[in-house]
Image (cartoon, rainbow, N blue to C red):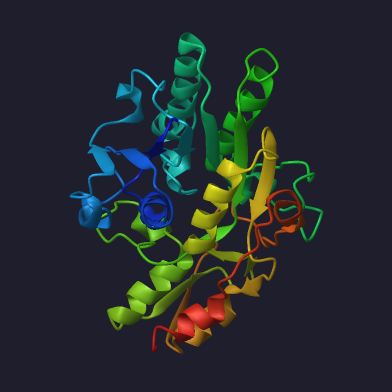
Amino acid sequence: MNNKILITGVAGFIGSNLLDYLISNTDYNIVGYDNLETGSINNIQHNLENNRFNFVNKSVLSILSLKEFKFIFHLAALPRIQPSYDQISHHINNNLLLGIKLIEIMIKEDHYPKLINSSSSSIYGNPDEIPTTEKCIPNCLNPYSFQKYEFEKYLEILSFKYPLNYVNLRYFNQYGERSFNPSNKFNAYSSVIGIFLNQKKKSESLTIVGDGRQRRDFIHVSDICKANYMAAISEKTNKLSFNLGSGKPIEIIEVAKIISDDIIFLPPRLGEADITHASIELAYKIFAWQPEYQLTQYLLSKNL
C-alpha cells in the first residue's frame, strides 16, 4: 500500500497547519517541499524530528519523480494580490508553472497521484451570484486570481488527454495560527485577521483598506485542513471544484471593532472584490464537509 504523500509549500501558513493535521490524524509518511521564500522554518520546527516527516528545503522545480506518492497537496504559491501586479513573471512561475511541473512529471512517468490543488475564491472577482456557487463564471480582477484560475483550466483541459486525478479547493478568506509571518516580505498583504491581531499585539492602530464596508467570508485554517484531507480520500471529488468558506460574510469594520477601537483608514487597493460569500453546499453534498470554527469565537478566545 502506498502510504506516502507530498505537501508543496509545507512551511507556509496553510501547509504547516495541514502537516500538523495529517501527522495527528493519519498514519501517512509525509514529504514536504518549501524553498522558504515566504514560508518559515519556525512553522514546522516541531515536526522536523518526527520520523514520519521529511522536509526538503528546495523548490518544487527540483522534484524529479512522483511515483512514490499517493496524494499531492499543492499549496506552494505566492498568495498575495497586490505584489502580483509588480512581480509578474515571478508570480507566474510560482502560481502557475510549479503546478505545471507536477503535471509534466505525472505525464512523463505515466503515474497520476491524486492532486489536491489549493485554488482561490478570488477567481470569482465581484460575482453576480451571491452566495457564490462553483458554477459562477470566473471574473479575475488581478494577476494572482488569473494565475490560480489558469492552473485550474490547465488541469481541466489536460485531463481530456491524460488520466489526471485532481480536485480544486477554492479558499475564501483564511485565518488562524501562523497566518502572519513578520519576516515575510509580503506580510502587508497577509490575511487581514493576522494583520489586525499583529497590530493589536504591538499596540498599533488597526489599518483598514478602503471604508471597511467590504464584506468577507472567513474560513479557519483548521477547517481548510480537514477539507483537504476529506477531499483527498473521497472517491467522488475527482475533477471537481469546491468552495471552502463559512457561508457567513462579515464587514471588515465589524471585525476590526471586535479587536480594537483604534482604527485608521487607508486608500482602497486595485483589484480587490467588494464581497466574498461562499455557497458551501456542494462540499457538504459530495464529501460531507462543513466548517466548525466561527470567526467571532476565535477572536474572543484571544482575550483582546
Q: Residue furthest left?
A: 49
Q: Nearer the viewer, residue 193 or 125?
A: 193
Q: Is residue 269 left or right of residue 129?
A: left
Residue 212 appearing in the image = no
Q: Based on the displayed image, in which of its 4 quarters is residue 178 positioned? A: bottom left
Please say if 93 is above or below 128: above
Q: Residue furthest front?
A: 1
Q: Nearer the viewer, residue 170 or 140?
A: 170
Residue at position x 41%, y 56% in the image? 21
Q: How many marks?
A: 0
Please say if 289 is above or below 177: above
Q: Is residue 294 left or right of residue 128?
A: left
Q: Quadrant of the C terminus?
A: bottom left
Q: Is residue 152 left or right of residue 25?
A: right
Q: Quadrant of the N terminus?
A: top left
In percent of width and height, residue 204 lies at: 32, 80
Q: Nearer the viewer, residue 266 or 62?
A: 62
In percent of width and height, residue 103 lies at: 51, 21
Residue 53 appearing in the image = yes
Q: Nearer the viewer, residue 33 or 208?
A: 33
Residue at position x 46%, y 89% in the image? 261
In percent of width and height, residue 134 lies at: 75, 46
Residue at position x 26%, y 53% in the image? 44
Please say if 225 is above or below 162: below
Residue at position x 23%, y 49% in the image? 50
In percent of width and height, residue 77 lies at: 43, 40
